[in-house]
Image (cartoon, helix red, strand yellow):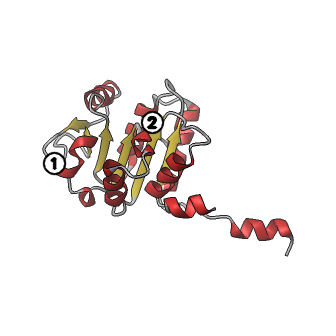
Amino acid sequence: MSYEAFLRAKAPAHPDTGISVDTVHHSLFEWQAAVVKWALRKGRACLFEDCGLGKTLQQLVWAQNVPGDVLILTPLAVAEQTAAEARRFGINAEVTRDGTKSQRGHITITNYERLHRYDVADFRGLVLDESSILKAHDGKTRTAIIEAAQSVPFRLACTATPAPNDHMELANHAEFVGAMTRNEMLAR
């Protein structure tokens, strides 16, 4: 075995656990459609994209294609903006704040602060809008999100590109999607 093959065998794998789709929402640019299809195929993925690249529409289309109910968690002032974006593109989504699922479609939008009102196990998909909320290595919200996410088969984290040298934030994202724990990543 060559040294290159040995190293390749040691690389951690994050296997596809999702679904394959042929087409997605017609409003996506070609590269956005490719990203959404990739994230759906992975099942658990992160979209680290700069501001203005359409992460909200991408996460809505991803959620629309997940087979089952999806919960989108947003910062406080963003839930209504996400719902407005959904309406603009004809995607059924609803903001709820009391722990109930959307009555309009299978996409429910709420704020991070209301996570405790939902039984996340009732959802097949979980989206973190502005997932930089995972930045703190010892935060209560970070811990609650990562623990709740373990029962959800489809997970998507969306944020502007995290600092490439912020190993804690990247490790928390890796733990959220189930690629490896924060401690495993930091040890590597």
Q: Which residue is mark 1?
A: 99
Name the quadrant of the C terminus. Answer: bottom right
Hey, which residue is sitting farthest right in the picture? 2
Indicate which label's residue lies in the foreground, 1 or 2: 1
Q: Earlier in the sequence, mark 1 or mark 2?
A: 2
- Image vertical order of residue 81 relative to residue 91, above or below: above
In contact (CB < 8 Å): disc 1 and disc 2: no
Residue 154, quarter of the rendered image: bottom left
Can residue 63 be seen in the rendering of this structure?
yes
133, above or below 29, in the image: below
**Residue 147, position as x, y percentages in the image:** 34, 60
Q: Which residue is mark 2?
A: 58
Characterize the local packing of mark 2: few (<14), some (14-19) or many (20 or more) Cα atoms within 10 angstroms: many
Q: Residue at coordinates 47% horizontally, 61% vertically from top-left?
A: 178
Direction bottom: furthest residue: 1
Image quadrant where one finds the N terminus: bottom right
Farthest residue in the front direction?
138
Q: Is residue 108 left or right of residue 66?
A: left
Residue 111 placed where, x, y %?
A: 25, 39
Distance from disc 1 to disc 2, alpha carbons, whole Å, reads: 24 Å
Q: Residue at x 33, y 27 (%)?
A: 85
